[in-house]
Amino acid sequence: MTTSDINMAKIVLHEEKNLQGRTHETSNDISDISTYLSRVQSVRVESGCFMIYERPNFMGTQQLLRRGESIENLSLVGMSSGIKSIRLIPVHRGQFRIKVFEKENLTGQMNELMDDVENIQDRLRMSEILSCQVMEGHWLLFEQPHHRGRVIYVKPGEQRTFREMGLGSIRIMSLRRITDIC
């Protein structure tokens, strides 16, 4: 990511619902928002693309937000306790490659992908995805076919199990590259 990409991203966190109360603006990842605000009950993305999390250290329920989007009441998106951490999703201008595995710890049937998959059962003949290795790009993994349900953001590196992300026993059924959506 270039310095200009970072400078272009900005999210505004609000302590109260309806974009009210004390605020904190940032262009960076925050692993524990309590360092800056006692709570976050609403949010607005002025530029860039961010993933918000219901728990510290990028854990629990996740929600993708793009430039111009806001959430005025987090309980409407399943985050009734507020936002506890945020992650900037950097702009990626290269190729996209991910290896997906049917079992945890990068084992079982494996497929290497370079594009979106709306239904892993139909296209890959896999029952589910339980681990992955991102070689290039940034990806969104979805619990249901056709990019629906709970979502997980993964960046380059290994994800040996999704349970480590505080999501319980989530099964991945579709995936999407983060390209022009941010």
Image (cartoon, rainbow, N blue to C red):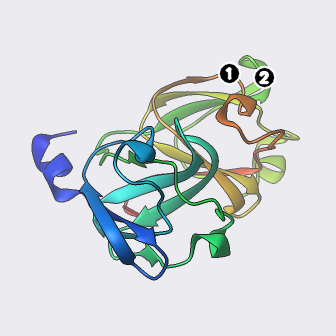
Indicate the position of residue 2 as horizontal and vertical percent values: 15, 40
In the picture, the quarter occupied by the C terminus is bottom left
Residue 128, above or below 148:
above
Instruction: Say which mark, if any, is on residue 160.
Output: 1
Label 1: state its secondary structure: loop
Q: In this view of the protein, can residue 11 be seen by the observer?
A: no
Q: Is residue 121 left or right of residue 16?
A: right
Kindly report the distance in space between the C-alpha atoms of the residues bearing marks 1 and 2: 6 Å
Quick check: 1 left or right of 129?
left
Of the numbered discs 1 and 2, the one sitting upstream in the chain is 2
Taking depth in this image into account, of 128 and 86 the one nearest to the observer is: 86
Q: Quadrant of the N terminus?
A: top left
Looking at the rendered structure, the number of numbered marks drawn on it comes to 2
Q: Looking at this view, is 149 or 21 the one in front?
A: 21
Cβ atoms at labels 1 and 2 below 8 Å apart: yes
* Residue lying at 38% horizontally and 48% vertically, measured from the top left: 89
Residue 166 visible to the viewer = yes
Nearest the viewer among 37 and 74 is 37
Q: Residues within 10 Å of mark 2 (few under 14, many from 20)?
A: some
- Residue at 77% from the left image edge and 32% from the top image edge: 130
Q: Quadrant of residue 28?
A: top left
Kind of residue sitting beneath label 2: Glu
Q: Position of residue 179 (x, y in %)?
A: 40, 55
Quadrant in the picture for residue 102: top right
Local crowd size for mark 1, using a 10 Å CA cut-off: few (<14), some (14–19), many (≥20)? some
Q: Which mark is residue 104?
A: 2
